[in-house]
Each structure stands twice: as structure tokens, then as C-alpha cells.
Image (tube, rainbow, N blue to C red):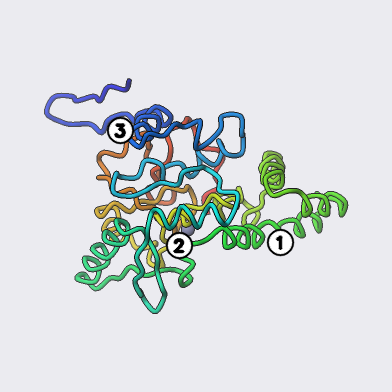
């Protein structure tokens, strides 16, 4: 157990609880086990849990996904129907989110607008709910160009490229993460892990309908308003991406998240030791 340190009258922010410990507690309340949502033997699923896992700590009023990695459209549809979602038109885009997340977003937006600011979806409807097929297509928008790039650089052979293209999806993800260990990154600008650019297929927080890509992410006041309403940046280096946790910012450390500041932006990520090498962009 982590003990929060209170020195005199001045209350220091408590040391973050270990992620796995906090996660186990959070899942127990939902009668779930880590082993069920994310098998310990599945290295890729575990890596994904440690990158995107904040979503599993979402407040009671929202429903986290039942698995770390969805593997079929039908499974996604079933989850999305059970969790439920509402639709709003925001800046001409049809936005679909879980009801609790939507309610908080609309409150945040109203508050922003009072200050002559706004909170709008970045890139249309895809800024919010996505299905399995979307996650596959988006993976390819990073995976395929990066293959061509590394082929052009002579770092991959034509045979390797063709083999990678034809691998079963799960193996493809595993091998991409393996290649990244030797510096062959697959993000859009090939400078960082593909996981900070696009989610692995079947894993997006957008599938959970608890994420929104925000046009105005660059504005510190907008980020502050979103945080006040339970929306936080939880995926390192994915700057426009916000996650609905429905928790107070001061409580995030005890929920197993640690605060990391990159380029002046605050990220709340699973507290599992040092984050993997990040190149700030
Ligand atoms: Zn996103």
C-alpha cells in the first residue's frame, strides 16, 4: 500500500498507487479480474494495457471495455450496445459517446464557450466512437506507409515487407512492436511508437466510446476545463486525444495513474515504472 504523505498543513500530492494494484481494485468492483480482460501471457495485450489502460479506471457511471484487445466486429458491437451511447452534433460532426462522457463533455463545452473558447471534434465523427473496422483501417494508415519508408531506407527487405503485410493481425502488431525496439518506428513521422500515433487494431479507447480527439487541444485553458469535467490526456504523446475518466484530477494518483508532463501538457498514465522512450514532438 502507498501511504499518502501529509507534511504539516501543506498537503503534498500523494505518491501514485501502483497501477496494477489500483486496477485490480477497480475491476473487483465490477466483478472482473485483470486475467480475464488481459491474459498475463499475452505480451502485446499487456503492453497495450500499460499504454492505454487508464480507461479501465473510469468512474462507475461509465463502462470500460471487457477486454484489452477486441478481436472481432461483432464483439465490439455487443459491447457498444450494452454500454449504450448518445449522439450529439458538435461543429457539424455526429459525435457518439457513452452517456456519462457526453454529459461531461457538453458541460465542459458550455463552460468553454462562456469564455469565448470552444471544444470541438478533430477530424469529424471519427473523433469519437469508432468500430472495429475503423481501428483496422487506421492501423493501416500508419503501418503501410511506415513499411514503405523502411523498405526505402533499406532497413527492411521486400520479403520482410511482404511477410509482415500478410501476417495474422495479432502477430503483425507483435512484430511491429518488436521492430520498434530497434528504432524502426511506425508512427506517422516514424519518430515514435505507432502506439502513440494510432491504437493497435481492436484496442482504441474510441471503441470504448470514452475518448474524443479535440481540435483545441493546444489551448491550456481548454485542457483545464476538460480536466475539471473528468476528461484527461491519458495516452502519452497523442496530443489531441482525451479520455473520459469521470474522476477528480486530485484523485488520479490513488487510482494508479501518474502525472507526466510533456511539452507543457499533462498526461495521466498507468503508474508502471518509467514510460518507454518518448520523443517529444
Ligand atoms: Zn484519439
Q: Which residue is mark 2?
A: 129
Relative side of 67 to 154, left or right? left
Relative side of 152 to 28, left or right? right
In the rendered structure, find residue 179 and report the number of the disc placed on it.
none
SS of the residue at dot 2?
loop
In the rendered structure, find residue 254 and report the number of the disc placed on it.
3
Residue 253 in picture, x, y percent from top left: 32, 35
Residues at circles 1 and 3 in contact by the CB criterion of under 8 Å:
no
Depth check: 38 or 119 in front?
38
Q: Which residue is mark 1?
A: 145
Residue drawn at the location 47% of the way across and 47% of the way down: 236
Q: In the rendered structure, which disc, 1 or 3, sits on the residue that comes first in sequence?
A: 1
The answer to whether residue 215 is visible is yes
Q: In the rendered structure, which disc, 2 or 3, sits on the residue that comes first in sequence?
A: 2
Q: Residues within 10 Å of mark 2 (few under 14, many from 20)?
A: many
SS of the residue at dot 3?
helix
Amino acid at each position: 500500500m502507498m501511504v499518502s504523505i501529509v507534511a504539516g498543513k501543506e498537503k503534498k500530492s500523494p505518491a501514485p498507487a501502483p497501477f496494477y494494484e489500483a486496477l485490480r481494485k477497480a475491476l473487483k468492483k465490477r466483478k472482473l479480474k485483470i486475467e480475464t480482460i488481459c491474459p498475463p501471457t499475452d505480451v502485446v495485450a499487456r503492453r497495450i494495457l500499460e499504454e492505454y489502460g487508464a480507461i479501465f479506471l473510469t468512474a462507475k457511471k461509465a463502462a470500460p471495455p471487457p477486454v484489452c484487445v477486441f478481436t472481432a466486429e461483432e464483439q465490439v458491437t455487443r459491447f457498444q450496445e450494452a454500454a449504450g451511447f448518445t449522439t450529439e452534433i458538435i461543429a457539424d460532426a455526429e459525435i457518439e459517446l457513452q452517456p456519462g462522457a457526453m454529459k461531461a463533455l457538453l458541460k465542459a463545452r458550455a463552460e468553454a464557450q462562456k469564455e469565448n473558447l470552444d471544444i470541438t471534434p478533430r477530424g469529424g465523427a471519427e473523433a469519437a466512437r469508432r468500430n472495429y473496422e475503423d481501428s483496422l483501417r487506421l492501423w493501416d494508415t500508419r503501418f503501410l506507409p511506415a513499411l514503405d519508408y523502411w523498405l526505402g531506407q533499406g532497413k527492411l527487405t521486400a520479403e520482410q515487407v511482404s511477410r509482415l503485410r500478410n501476417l495474422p493481425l495479432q502477430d503483425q502488431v507483435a512484430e511491429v512492436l518488436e521492430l520498434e525496439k530497434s528504432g524502426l518506428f511506425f508512427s506517422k513521422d516514424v519518430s515514435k511508437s505507432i502506439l502513440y500515433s494510432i491504437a493497435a487494431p481492436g484496442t482504441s479507447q474510441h471503441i470504448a466510446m470514452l475518448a474524443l480527439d479535440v481540435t483545441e487541444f493546444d489551448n491550456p485553458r481548454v485542457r483545464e476545463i476538460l480536466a475539471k469535467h473528468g476528461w484527461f490526456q491519458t495516452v502519452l504523446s497523442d496530443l489531441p486525444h482525451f479520455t473520459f475518466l469521470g474522476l477528480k484530477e486530485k484523485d488520479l494518483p490513488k487510482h494508479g495513474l501518474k502525472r507526466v508532463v510533456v511539452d507543457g501538457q499533462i498526461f495521466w498514465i498507468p503508474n508502471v515504472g518509467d514510460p518507454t522512450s518518448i520523443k517529444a514532438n
